[in-house]
Amino acid sequence: MNINTERRIGLWEAWKLTKRGYGIIRSLDPSFLPLSAFSAVIKAIQPLSVLYFLARILNELTGGAEARTIITWVSITIAVAFALSVIRALVDRKQRVSESIFHAKLYFLHSERYMAFDFEHVEQSQTNELLADIEAKINGNSLGIPRLYYLFPQLVTHFVGIIVASILLIGMFDTTPANTANFFTSSYTTAALGGLIILILTLTLLVRRNEDKVLAQLFDQNPKMNTFLKYYYRYVMAGVAGKDIRIYNQQPAIKAIMNYWFGSMPWNRYFDYEGKLGAAAAAGNALIGGCVYLFIGLRALAGMYAIGSVVQYVGAITSLVDNLTAFVYTCAGLKTNCQYLAQFYEFLDLPDIKYKGSLTTEKRIDNDYEIEFHNVSFKYPGTDTYALKNFDLKLRVGQRLAVVGMNGSGKTTMIKLLCRLYDPTEGEITLNGINIKKYDYAEYMDLFAVVFQDFKLFALPLGQNVAAAAQVDQERAALCLEKAGFGKRLQGFSQGLDTCLYKEFDREGVEVSGGEAQKIALARALYKDAPIIVLDEPTAALDPIAESEVYAKFNEIVKAKTAVYISHRLSSCRFCDDIAVFHEGRLVQRGNHEQLLDEKGEKYEELWNAQAQYYQ
């Protein structure tokens, strides 16, 4: 998902996009706009106030004023300059702190929105490419919301600078002409100078627009660049990848890939172009500066201005031109930035596809829940192949259901539908006879504790990993870890449940093996105390015998709860009273172990015979 560099954004649309952006900034940092505006005003006034007082001092000196008068002006100049410097330093210090907090909050805004997405968006490559592109432009190039953050004080500074400089120039046009009039002392000169300034400003605006257009095209030339870089940094910096990189000497290969990606981006062309445009803009400013000095100098020679006034007018008109140029440049930058704001809003505004009902799930002490799949078929978004087809299944309270089949047979897809990570393409799923879409989504999710094959633990304290929350019931968490077989290891932790997993944020953090991580994940499922527990191949990395032992132990722990065991191996089947056999997205067999073995030549017998050596 890239920036459309050819799409023209009108002024009204640009205004709405920018206004929304500053609304987001205000929500993240309410003090930014007033504080930034105040600092910008001080920054604009500071040099021009000194210029004004310096001009007064020079006029007093050349006019033969008394020493007391001159000392008074000098004292005022020093006092004003000192006061403005102190105020600006204090405000800037507060702004630096505020800026750091703002960037952290903006990054959290991305994460918060991403976590709130329907799971369908999370698994789509387009969403992840869009997020990677936005993050790269924000972090690497300060585009989008950060650009608004940086441009606002500049806009205020230049605007105030234009006003103050214009005020300082008023006297230049009230001066009584000298007896000897010429072109340089006439009003035509002023008009000519004004026309030159307008011409240079117009050229500056065109330069800026072309520069931003080239930059936008550069960013979007390779849409997968930012996604690749994000993956590269995560892969290379990860401790697990570090072992593979060294053992297999992957450094040269990684370096070659990086050189290819960077070499394919025409940065040199952009910087060449930027240099030429910058030189043209600098030449225009130099031309204006030369004309200003000539204009003021000749008028001074004609006796129109005192020495102090010459200093004031030269400084003021130079400041006016600089601020006008910068103001136009900044406004053009704001308009160009709207393309990146539109992309950011596209991410924020991704619609929630999933219907979220309002019915409450019945809180049953007896956990008497019945879930049924009614002729359910499902295709993943963007595909034409059914992952599940014409699927019917009923889950009864207290049931032990083993779901088996080869990899890719639809087992995990069934669990995703059961937990409403996706909704069926066809058919429906009911809870106690009511379509699960009609239930409040959060309440429905509370019915399930799932341990997926690709489960994740976080670099947080062990207790928070088990509780999946900031507040931890210490006794309950310890008991769940004990039941899951992690109790002995827990006793070796000096900080107990407060021990941080991994070392990303804590030097004293502990590393856990794959088997230990699985036990923590199982403890997390027990801690939730949901009526339905699902194990979706979390022990796939273990050998069949070890997996069988884990399932048998967990079967004892869950007691009267409804349990679903997913596996492509049959270790979970021997203690389950019901087995569902999946093949190519369909439920092909169902029954208990003995019944299915009696069905000669069918899929279950094939799987059992292939794995029987591990269980006999």
Image (spheres, rainbow, N blue to C red):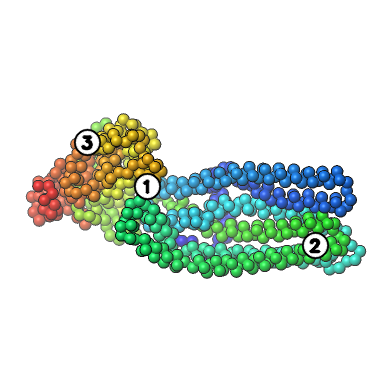
The residue wearing badge 3 is 557
Could you tell me which secondary element the residue under label 2 belongs to?
helix
Question: In the figure, 264 relative to 25: above or below?
Answer: below
Mark 2 is surrounded, within 10 Å at the Cα level, by few (under 14), some (14 to 19) or many (20 or more) other residues, namely: many
Residue type of the residue flagged with mark 3: Ile
Mark 1 lies on residue: 355
Give the distance between the C-alpha atoms of the residues marked 1 and 3, in whole angstroms.
Answer: 35 Å
Q: Alpha-carbon neighbours of circle 1 within 10 Å: few (<14), some, or many (≥20)? A: few
Q: Is residue 496 above or below residue 118?
A: above
Residue 80 position within the rendered picture, expressed as x and y whole percent measured from the top left? 74, 44
**Reading the chain from its start, which is encountered first: label 3 or label 2?**
2
Amino acid beneath label 1: Tyr
Q: Position of residue 612 (x, y in %)?
A: 11, 50
Which quadrant, please, contains the N terminus? bottom left
Residue for badge 2? 296
Q: Locate residue 569 relative to residue 505 in the image: left or right.
A: left
- Residue 12, image x, y percentages: 59, 57
Does residue 234 appear left or right of residue 206 in this picture? Answer: left
Q: Is label 1 in a helix, a strand or a loop? A: loop
